[in-house]
Amino acid sequence: MNLKLLLPFQIFAEVSGVRRLVAETRGGAFGLLPQRLDCVAALTPGILIYETAADGEVFVAVDEGVLVKTGSQVLVSVRRALRGSDLAQLREAVQQEFLTLDEHAQSVRAVMAKLESGFLRRVATLYDQ
């Protein structure tokens, strides 16, 4: 299989000769072998594992995203990714960086929610008149 790992702003990795791949979804982890039927899966933050003859097992921490397998091509599109050889370090990175939103992102979401609700209230008063 050929694996292409995409980030919003660049190609994180292009790997050919992938023997197997394991990814995490809301329903649990699942594996892909070269003969598997085509599929699409929504990925959750976790560890993506793929194996090649040259590199052996490779571990990549990924954020939420989508996996698409068509024929021998596997495209994985995620927001963020980190490669590493230490599983404990990668698991910690997933918990710290991917699963918890930083305070800035939470405050921006709160402000946007207030703006949206204020806008909807004003539009509703226009229709009531």
Image (spheres, rainbow, N blue to C red):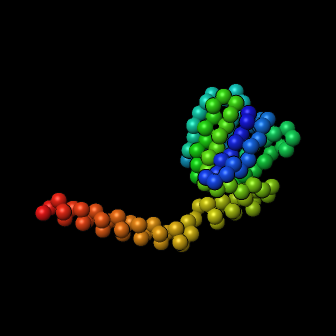
Q: Hey, which residue is sitting farthest front in the picture?
A: 9
Q: Position of residue 13 (x, y in %)?
A: 73, 47
Q: Hey, which residue is sitting farthest right in the picture?
A: 54
Q: Hey, which residue is sitting farthest left in the picture?
A: 129
Image: 38 above or below 78: above
Q: Position of residue 4 (x, y in %)?
A: 70, 42
Q: Position of residue 42 (x, y in %)?
A: 56, 44
User: Dividing the image into 4 quarters, which one contains the C terminus?
Assistant: bottom left
* Residue drawn where x is 66% and y is 60% of the image: 94
Looking at the image, residue 66 sits to the left or right of residue 116; the answer is right
The answer to which quarter of the image holds residue 30 is top right
* Residue drawn where x is 85% and y is 38% of the image: 53
Label count reads 0
Looking at the image, residue 123 sits to the left or right of residue 90; the answer is left
The answer to which quarter of the image holds residue 51 is top right
* Residue drawn where x is 58% and y is 52% of the image: 64
User: Dividing the image into 4 quarters, which one contains the N terminus?
Assistant: top right
* Residue drawn where x is 14% and y is 61% of the image: 128
Looking at the picture, tell me which residue is in the foreground, 48 or 68: 68
Looking at the picture, tell me which residue is in the foreground, 22 or 17: 17
Q: Position of residue 127 (x, y in %)?
A: 17, 59
